[in-house]
Amino acid sequence: MKPRVHQIQLPGRVRLEFAEQGARRGTPVIALHGVTDSWRSFEPVLPHLPSGLHVLALTQRGHGDSDKPSAGYRPADFAADVAAFMDAMEIERAVLVGHSMGSVNAMRCAIDHPSRVAGLLLAGTMPWFGRQSELLAFHRDQILPLADPVPEAFARDFQLSTLARPIGASMLDGFVTESLKVPAHVWRDAFAGFIGDDFSLRLRAIDVPALIVWGRQDAFCTAADQQAMLGLIRTASLVTYADAGHAMHWEEPRRFARDLRRLVDSVAAHAATA
């Protein structure tokens, strides 16, 4: 399968790029990338997913070839875009897959729009990114001073920091290219959004099947963070990739796809017994 790439105008909101794969009558799966990435963040995973899944990988506002408004980069804004996208695509409920910032937006969507979320795969996540002093310092010292054009070397170093093992040079170059599409104000505001909004205690309200995926070599998210997640989302289970970093779906895309399929199966079983 090769994904079909589209553009969609969300009424009263933004125009978003997205990639679509699989049968439209299949189980809807919406994938949300990390900060400065795009739908292409899930490109390594897509070939390993069955055609029975209706996969829609979004390029969120401010990123890739989607609209880049001057404001609206808090998790609630991204979550509202997801709900509006589902309305436009006539999708009642979907499994949400979120990586890093995308995991924050997916959790926020499950809180703000609980009837629209059937399950969650949360990769490279923690209850609240704003409690990490190193990330706060990185935002203050490295992100806030950014100006357009964002230096290529900075974008490359940022993407490399998410990896524990090398990936293909062309793949890495592609992810850097996507990061360079993101203007400096979006780097600043998107980072500020997901490190500034603490809704961790509201995660206890999530009651759909959830899978937390963590790379043991993650430079940002710790083992303690994953245990905290399990304590907050009672329906969650944890899968650890021993040799992977923050971007485990780039390092082990086949395994990531297998874990996503397993989550979809558990969502179907949950729905059958509800």
Image (cartoon, rainbow, N blue to C red):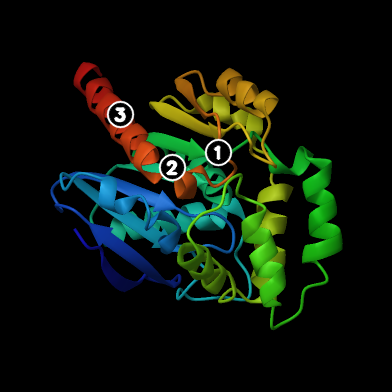
Label 2 to label 3, Cα distance in Å?
A: 16 Å
The answer to whether residue 89 is visible is no
Q: Nearer the viewer, residue 230 or 50?
A: 50
Which residue is pictured at 54% across the width and 47% down the height? 247
Label 3 to label 1, Cα distance in Å?
A: 19 Å
Q: What kind of residue is marked 1?
A: Ala
Q: What kind of residue is marked 3?
A: Arg
Q: Residues within 10 Å of mark 2 (few under 14, many from 20)?
A: some
Q: Residue furthest bottom?
A: 149
Q: Nearer the viewer, residue 100 or 81?
A: 100
Q: Secondary structure at mark 3?
A: helix
Q: Residues within 10 Å of mark 1 (few under 14, many from 20)?
A: many
- Is 244 rendered above or below residue 211? below
Q: Earlier in the sequence, mark 1 or mark 2?
A: 1
The answer to whether residue 218 is visible is yes
- Is 129 rendered above or below residue 157? above
Question: Residue 252 has which mark?
Answer: 2
Which residue is pictured at 64% across the width and 39% down the height? 218
Cβ–Cβ below 8 Å for labels 1 and 2?
Answer: yes
Judging by the rendered image, the residue that carries numbered circle 3 is 262
Q: Earlier in the sequence, mark 2 or mark 3?
A: 2
Judging by the rendered image, the residue that carries numbered circle 1 is 244
Q: What kind of residue is marked 2?
A: Glu
Q: Secondary structure at mark 2?
A: loop
Locate residue 61, reporting x and y percent. 51, 67
Q: Nearer the viewer, residue 211 or 247?
A: 247
Q: Earlier in the sequence, mark 3 or mark 1?
A: 1
Locate residue 173, reporting x and y percent. 52, 69
Q: Quadrant of the C terminus?
A: top left
Q: Secondary structure at mark 1?
A: loop
